[in-house]
Image (cartoon, helix red, strand yellow):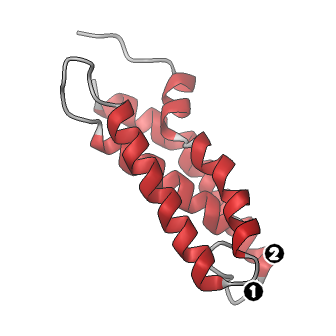
Amino acid sequence: MQAPEPYYTSLVKLFPVEAVTLYPLAIGIAGSDVALRLILIAVIALFVIALRWFGTQEESGGGADRLAIIVSVMSFLLYAAALGGFGHLPGGPEQTRQLLAFLTIMWVALVPSVLRRARR
């Protein structure tokens, strides 16, 4: 049986730094155009799926790690939502940022541990 990978290795694999890097560019490009912002968020999510699909395949031609891909996309979407990418809660932008930042931190902190246990 293979030893589980360290927590931080799991975290790096599951949080899509490439999407976090692209998101501010997308927001700058979209400006105040909500439809374009949502399209660019979708494009970034598809980019994460494609990149992670090929990046998680075994070199010998095995399947991709679908669970890791789903978690990566969810991590990005939570991040984008925390920064107002999908609009705001009724309490306004500050409430939205605080709630979604909290959820993102909890997600990123807990998911690698849960996945490591599930893969044992």
Query: Is 99 on the left-hand or right-hand side of 68?
Result: right
Distance from disc 2 to disc 1, alpha carbons, whole Å, reads 8 Å
- What label sits on residue 70 in the rendered view? none
Where does residue 46 sit, x and y in percent of width and height?
42, 57
Query: Is 7 on the left-hand or right-hand side of 83?
Result: left
Q: Amino acid at mark 1?
A: Gly
Image height of 47 relative to 34, above or below = above
Give the secondary structure at mark 1. loop
Image height of 46 relative to 95, above or below = above
Where does residue 116 sit, x and y in percent of width and height?
38, 29
Can you say which quadrant of the picture contains the N terminus? top left
For the point 27% across and 23% down, which residue is it? 120
Where, by quadrant of the figure, is residue 77 drawn?
bottom right
For the point 28% across and 43% down, which residue is it? 66
Residue farthest toward the right in the current orientation of the protein:
94
For the point 61% across and 41% down, which residue is it? 17
CB-based contact (under 8 Å), mark 2 and mark 1: yes
Where does residue 57 sit, x and y in percent of width and height?
28, 29
Q: Which residue is mark 1?
A: 91
Q: Nearer the viewer, residue 42 or 99?
A: 42
Q: Which residue is mark 2?
A: 94
Query: Is 13 on the left-hand or right-hand side of 3?
Result: right
